[in-house]
Image: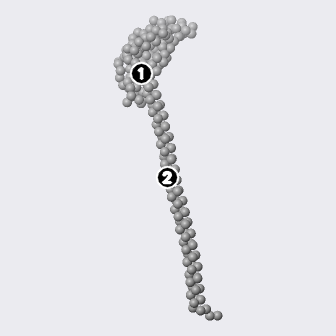
Amino acid sequence: MKISKTSLIFLAVGVIAILAFCIGTTRAKQVSERQTLETKLTQAQQKLTSLQYDDLKDKKTQLTVQIERYNTQAESTQSKLSSNQTSITATDLIIETARYYDVDITAVSSGGESTGALSGTRCATLPVVINVQGKINNIANFVYSLSQKFPTSTVSNVKISQDSTQDTEASSSESSGADSDLIASAAINLIIYDYKGE
């Protein structure tokens, strides 16, 4: 059976039309998928930017809170290191405390205010040397009380010596267990710290 030229032309046009339709449909599908992917990519980038910003914002907030907490602790510590003691007021308080503990002060001396460091922090210091005489228990209580009366102080050295006139009494007292009643002399080195800020 012979196909006419006209039929062949219609057949070729039909095949080309079908091919064009298939190619057009595929192309439209690709364009649609590409637009969908581009939209998803844009959304993902926006979400990533938003997440990074939120993370950074949270970290900044946490760091700000930590800095405020540190500053509060530093101010609290520095205020605890502050002492308004002068040589005269310190001496008055030492004499009053000694009287309370029945300890006789034989001398109080101070070289005046100078500078020093307490745990790496620069402070003004007031070194005071106190010579006392009294019962050993009373001297011990007096020394302990100094740290309460001067909370920003340290007792750097306590040198206790027994009076030589009591050597014979000491041996009899030791046998009777009355060491605390022995009269002794002590030299106490006290350093009062005062933090005045940077």
Position of residue 43 relative to residue 152, above or below, is: below
Q: How much space separates mark 2 and mark 1, taking CA atoms? A: 53 Å
Q: How is the image coloured?
A: one colour
Q: Residue furthest bottom?
A: 2
The picture places residue 174, in percent across and down from the top left corner, at 54, 9
Q: How many numbered circles does the render carry?
A: 2
Give yes or no for contact between labels 2 and 1 (Cβ–Cβ under 8 Å): no
Q: Is residue 69 in view from this perspective?
A: yes
Image quarter of the C terminus:
top left
Kindly identify which residue carries mark 1.
83
* 12 vs 41: above or below: below
Amino acid type shown at disc 1: Ser
Measuring 45% from the left and 33% from the top, which residue is drawn there?
71
Q: Give percent across and percent down for residue 170.
A: 51, 8
**Quick one: 46 or 21, which is closer to the camera?**
21
Look at label 2 and name its amino acid.
Answer: Thr
Q: Quadrant of the N terminus?
A: bottom right
Residue pictured at 50% horizontal, 44% vertical: 58
* Residue 183 seen: no
- Few, some or many residues within 10 Å of mark 2 (<14, 14–19, 20+): few
Q: Nearer the viewer, mark 2 or mark 1?
A: 2
On the image, numbered disc 2 is attached to which residue?
Answer: 49
Identity of the residue furthest to the right in this view: 1
- In this image, 165 relative to 18: left or right? left
Dot label at residue 33: none
Q: Position of residue 107 (x, y in %)?
A: 39, 11
Q: Secondary structure at mark 2?
A: helix
Question: For residue 3, what is the image quadrant?
Answer: bottom right
Tell which of 132 and 121 is nearer to you.
Answer: 121
